Image (spheres, rainbow, N blue to C red):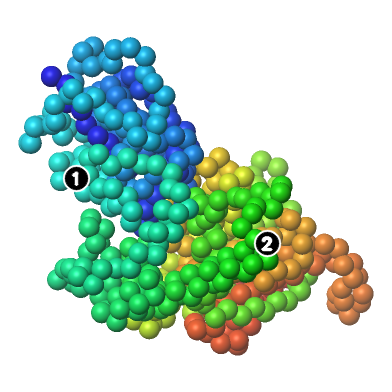
Amino acid sequence: MAVVREFTLPDLGEGLTEAVIVQWLVEVGDVVAVDQPVVEVETAKAMVEVPCPYGGVVTARFGAEGAEVPVGAPLVTVAVGAADDLAPSGGAGPDTAGAEPDSSAPPAPAGEDAADSGSGNVLVGYGTSASAARRRRVRPGTPAGPGARASAKSPEATASAAAAPVPTGTRTDTAGAEVAGTRTVAVISPLVRRIAREHGLDLRGLTGSGRDGLILRTDVESAIGALRERETAAAGAALGAGTAAVPGEERIPLRGMRGAAAEKFSRSRREIPDATCWVDADATELLAARRAMNVPGAPKVSLLALLARICTAALARYPELNATVDTAAQEIVRLPAVHLGFAAQTDRGLVVPVVRDAQNSTVEELSAEMARLTETARSGGLSLAELTHGTFTLNNYGVFGVDGSTPIINHPEAAMLGVGRISAKPWVHEGELAVRQVVQLSFTFDHRVCDGGTAGGFLRYVADCVERPALLLRGL
């Protein structure tokens, strides 16, 4: 006898709470195997193909392409059993957010091995055991339980959920984390809960900056400030233009990777007291060194890889810049390895792939890995591991034909080096005026981790290596 199993959107890791359906990979009535991808979704980090842990016949799909689906909401139902006996009779109707599974199939008996068989761990935090299948995280305002259905939320529903205060009677566990329904809110301080309650802030929609996602007072105050700014902007827009839409205007939702980038930029500006210094450097010798490296038959070395190697050498001299600030403990954390991020522009927006342990890589290895990550980013195939946990970022905005910029630090890192275009300019070289290849270097740093002397020393060393690449030989 067939058993209908419901497969929900699993925990995708990195605190992600929802995803957007990009493309369905199966149709209702298709026979799927264990671990076969059934849908492609876009999270705030990357494009992900979601494999189904059950094998059988697809009896229903939930959510249209383009719809946002919260973690724990149903994706598909699969009739587990003999495929010949499970194929639905008649044609399959169109997919809707409210589609129901085959009600004629009996529920899975408790403890039935066949119903719970699967591959084990499908994605981060998701397993196919009975206990894992029941574990869900439901966003505020989303109905829980087996009958819950994913749907695109209206602005009114979203605003209502965001404005709902945390009930005073909400229970807390032994660690002090506040629990609301099936969503655990990592907050310990009663003061934090009181401030959120007084300002109508729903803690369930907040990701904490403390250890293990702990929500701190600074997180709540920043969220309240952002909420007030949005209310003020909305009131001003309504006053200036009325409630009617401007003819011909275009509205682009800030969600997925675009929304994640916008939130990260805003958070960086809110939380990090950044400062920027810059210097012009003669890159003529660096370009000559690259030409000498790129001999016929040898692996090509990119200019970005050379700059990356200079950055790792500079961070070895100034390790205080390879750091982050633990606001919960009020400590500066210096990190032992350089996980070097570099900005890459794609059709889906700006992403920052990360080269792990860049300090141990040669220029050739850096060049090959950065080329691989760039190509993968453009195809939308980067994994979460390849997009997270960077410690320092290199931003080559010179490819856009501009000379300078004041980069926004990639939160929670402590610094970013920006590189402008290299162009021919008059330059005093060895006491004489000459035409040289000049580049502007911009360095933005978190003033909490160091003072201007350290930042200036770092930037000056980078500029010296650009002008005289042989300086790098001292560290070999």
Residue 204 position, x and y percent, is 33, 63
Residue 108 position, x and y percent, is 13, 31
> What's the residue type where badge 2 is placed?
Ala
Q: Which mark is residue 134?
A: 1
Q: Is residue 324 above or below residue 7?
A: below
Q: Say which residue appears at 41% left-offset and 53% top-offset.
A: 157
Q: Quadrant of the C terminus?
A: bottom right
In front: 227, or 475? 227
Report the number of discs. 2
Q: Secondary structure at mark 1?
A: helix
Residue 73 falls in image quadrant: top left
Task: Bin the neighbour count of mark 1 within 10 Å (Cα to Cα): few under 14, some 14-19, many 20 and up.
Answer: some
- For marks 2 and 1, the one nearer the N-term is 1
Q: Say which residue appears at 44% left-offset and 74% top-offset.
A: 224
Q: Which mark is residue 317?
A: none
In front: 444, or 61? 61
Residue 417 position, x and y percent, is 62, 69
> What's the residue type where badge 1 is placed?
Arg
Q: Which mark is residue 241?
A: 2
Q: Between marks 2 and 1, how big is the CA–CA gap?
A: 48 Å
Q: Is residue 316 visible?
A: no
Task: Bin the neighbour count of mark 2 within 10 Å (Cα to Cα): few under 14, some 14-19, many 20 and up.
Answer: few
Q: Quadrant of the N terminus?
A: top left
Residue 162 falls in image quadrant: bottom left
Is 79 on the left-hand or right-hand side of 154? left
Q: Is residue 38 above or below residue 281?
A: above
Q: Say which residue appears at 15% left-offset and 41% top-offset.
A: 130
Is 372 on the left-hand or right-hand side of 115? right
In front: 423, or 245? 245
